[in-house]
């Protein structure tokens, strides 16, 4: 699966995958409210990346393809174990959008959200946290919250 390998961070430092993925989610949220469905781009690629990351950080094995970074200097033979099993407060927004609002299964993302719920702040990250407070939704909220369908 090349979803997160493309950002070169799966092999280098596991924790950075969260930072980039959370930044992408932060940009998809306002776009959704403006009627642009970036969540669904490339066949829900962002969800696939979160599912991959959640699955790995919940202790499951995930596929990994050895790669060379874009500079050609660094060859990665395996996924990083640094920060493995350390879940950051980024899953609530993802799970609520895909599973609750859209009805798209996100089983590993849900497990990760359940493990850390309620999400609090994350002082070492570039994402705000508090996802349970900000992003929890019900299926009835689909019409009210999102302009896109």
Image (spheres, rainbow, N blue to C red):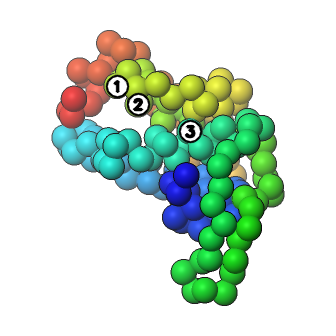
Q: Earlier in the sequence, mark 3 or mark 1?
A: 3
Residue displayed at 44% across by 54% down: 24
| Residue 73: quadrant of the picture | bottom right
- Marked residue nearer the N-terminal end (1 or 2): 2
Residue 82 lies left or right of residue 117; in this view the side is right
What quarter of the picture does the C terminus occupy?
A: top left
Question: Nearer the viewer's eye, disc 1 or disc 2?
Answer: 1
Q: Residues within 10 Å of mark 2 (few under 14, many from 20)?
A: many
Q: Quick one: label 3 or label 2, which is nearer the N terminus?
A: 3
Q: Is residue 68 visible?
A: yes
Q: Which residue is mark 2?
A: 97
Query: Does residue 125 show up?
Result: no
Secondary structure at badge 2 equals: helix
SS under mark 1: loop
Q: Which of 65/147 is in front?
A: 65
Q: Which mark is residue 51?
A: 3
Foreground mark, 3 or 2?
Answer: 3
Horizontal arrangement in the rendering, residue 74 relative to residue 136 (left or right): right
Identify the mark at residue 19; answer none if there is no mark: none
**Marks 1 and 2, how far apart at CA:** 6 Å
| Marks 3/1: CA–CA distance | 16 Å
37 over 20 or under it: above or below = above
The label shown at residue 102 is: 1
Q: Position of residue 109 (x, y in %)?
A: 58, 32
Image coords of residue 140 (percent x, y): 32, 12
**Is label 3 in a helix, a strand or a loop?**
helix
**Tally of numbered tags:** 3
Q: Are marks 1 and 2 in contact (CB under 8 Å)?
A: yes
Q: Residues within 10 Å of mark 3 (few under 14, many from 20)?
A: many
């Amino acid at each position: 699966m090349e979803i997160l390998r493309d950002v070169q961070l799966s092999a280098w430092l596991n924790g950075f995958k969260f930072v980039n993925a959370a930044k992408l989610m932060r940009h998809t949220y306002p776009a959704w409210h403006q009627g642009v469905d970036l969540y669904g781009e490339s066949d829900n690629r962002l969800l696939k990346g979160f599912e991959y990351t959640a699955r790995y950080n919940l202790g499951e094995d995930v596929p990994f393809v050895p790669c060379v970074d874009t500079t050609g200097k660094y060859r990665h033979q395996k996924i990083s174990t640094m920060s493995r099993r350390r879940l950051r407060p980024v899953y609530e927004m993802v799970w609520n959008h895909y599973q609750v609002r859209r009805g798209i299964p996100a089983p590993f993302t849900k497990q990760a959200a359940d493990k850390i719920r309620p999400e609090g702040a994350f002082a070492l990250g570039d994402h705000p946290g508090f996802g349970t407070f900000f992003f929890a939704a019900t299926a009835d909220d689909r019409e009210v919250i999102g302009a896109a369908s």
